Amino acid sequence: MILWPCALLILLPFLEDGSRSEFAPANLSLPFRNPRGSEWKKERALRESIKRIKHWNSLSFGDNITALYGINQFSHLSPEEFKAIYLQSRPSKVPRYVPQVALQGTDSPLPAKFDWRDKNVVTEVRNQRQCGACWAFSIVSGIESAYAIKRNTLEKLSVQQVIDCSYNNYGCNGGSTISALSWLNKTHVKLVRDSKYLFKAHTGLCHYFRRSDFGISITDYLAYDLSKHEDEMMKMLIKWGPLSVVVDALSWQDYLGGIIQHHCSSGKQNHAVVVTGFDRTGNIPYWIVRNSWGQTWGRNGYAHVKMGSNICGIADSVSAVSV
């Protein structure tokens, strides 16, 4: 491929201290092994990706804090293909938060930095592969953490069970976090361990289990539009645990690291993720966001999103569970 050296020239990933270094293509491979008929399509998509990436990075040239975009595992896809495969979360209306509704137990002073990962209640980042079930990965992650916070035991639960059994969603063809939480709350379905109901990356028939089998069910959930109240979102995070949120992630196709604060709009919710924490110690405060695109995407599977401006619509649909 003659495109590959060109791509290398425009990438400057982050070091641990936030500075940028010369690009080292370790652990990066572009999937050009499909039948010959698709080679031209991937080359064209990669050319367009390079143009898009150069433009976006030029808008914040010299800024060592803002997000950096570059070649990753999705660069062989056009934006339309990327959206059709990976951005399948369907928006649901949630009540707008009003200040008169207090989130109980959240009046303590807010810390400058908080991350549930530090308390060992967050499972490792998973990979949804080409299954459009980010909505299921998002809520299952929240349930795993809620159980670990309450029981001090971290269990890896079955996402496939939610994909197959949530009758008010569409499996790998999309779904809503709120619809899935409503289904879990009404039916009291117990989520079994992932090892008992493995992820297959496609929608299948619902498997049923005995009541005596181990499983975790939710006892309640809450959901708000906190678009103008990210301070309350911080309180909700600390009180309830990691939060399931739905964002506009179209520009995340090219994300490598840094703090997302541009190139992202709200009002087009299409991807469900999990907020595990926040950091307000630097010049730009940010949310710590766990994704479901594997550990090679972003910062070991995570993204940082600027706080306070509802970037990517991150506060438009926020939900949490109790178990």
Image: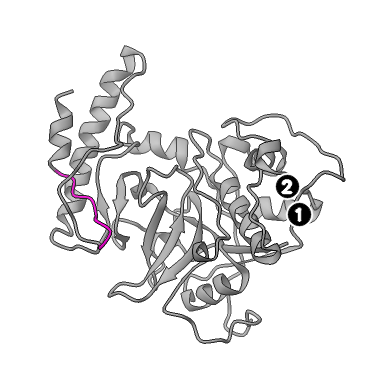
Residue named by callout 1? 217
Residue 28 rendering spot, x and y as whole percentages: 29, 35
Residue named by callout 2? 191
Q: Quadrant of residue 92?
A: bottom right
Disc 1 and disc 2: Cα gap in Å?
6 Å
- Magenta stretch prevailing secondary structure: loop
Q: Is residue 218 left or right of residue 28?
A: right
| Residue at 65 percent of width and 51 percent of height | 155
| Residue at 17 percent of width and 37 percent of height | 7
The residues colored magenta run 10-17
Residue 275 rendering spot, x and y as whole percentages: 49, 61
Asked if the residue under mark 2 is in contact with the one under mark 1, i.e. CB atoms within 8 Å, the reply is yes
Residue type indicated by callout 1:
Ser
Residue 99 rendering spot, x and y as whole percentages: 57, 83
Q: Quadrant of residue 186?
A: bottom right
Residue type indicated by callout 2:
Leu
Q: Secondary structure at mark 1?
A: loop
Residue 113, relative to residue 92: is it above or below? below
123 falls in the magenta region: no
| Residue sitting nearer the eye, 72 or 92 | 72
Residue 55, relative to residue 234: is it above or below? above
Q: Is residue 80 left or right of residue 316?
A: left
